[in-house]
Image (cartoon, helix red, strand yellow):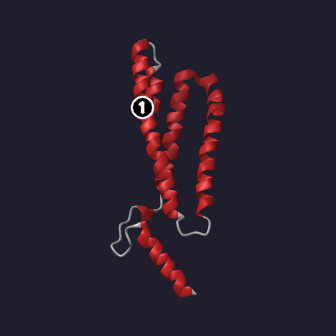
Amino acid sequence: MVIATFGFSFASDDKLFSAGAFYAISYISRLIQGIADAQICVALFSITSISFNFTNEPAKYLGIMQGSLALGMLLGPCISAAVYVPMHYWGTFLFYGCTIFFFGLGAACLLPNELNDKDDKEPETRAEKIAIHQEMEDEQE
């Protein structure tokens, strides 16, 4: 996502690239952005559903995720309008590329460790986890 956003910024330099090269680089960058966005959206909701699977309100957390994405879509044009005046076209994409990198790095550092740790004792499928959770609830009753 960051590389694609930087691609828009660098493609806009008319001293380095012709108009045809700008369109080609923009098309490729947009293709890369679309693929990255699809992967990120699937991963975000998957991680959220795995992390908050056994809470009383899993839909609450998925709703927060959806609201956050909507807020980002709403604020993006407002922020870019403010950034565009001082930084122009290339600077706006450079700003967004750095912002995506900064927040992406922070998100990667905050991912729950249990998503990366594979313990042989833990069940591997979601159905096994649900069955274990139901057994624990039955024992408590």
Residue lying at 60% horizontally and 58% vertically, measured from the top left: 61
Q: Position of residue 36 (x, y in %)?
A: 43, 40
Dot 1 falls on a residue whose secondary structure is helix
Residue lying at 52% horizontally and 58% vertically, measured from the top left: 48
Question: Which residue occupies the extreme left position in the image?
Answer: 120
Q: Quadrant of the N terminus?
A: top left
Q: Position of residue 105 (x, y in %)?
A: 47, 47
Residue 141 versus residue 50: which sits nearer the camera?
141
Q: Position of residue 51 (x, y in %)?
A: 51, 63
Residue 85 versus residue 77: which sits nearer the camera?
77
Residue lying at 64% horizontally and 33% vertically, measured from the top left: 79
Q: Amino acid at mark 1?
A: Leu
Mark 1, Cα crowd under 10 Å, few <14 / some 14-19 / many 20+, is few
Relative to residue 56, is residue 109 drawn left or right?
left
Determine which residue is flagged by label 1: 31
Q: Is residue 16 visible?
A: no
Q: Position of residue 110 (x, y in %)?
A: 50, 56
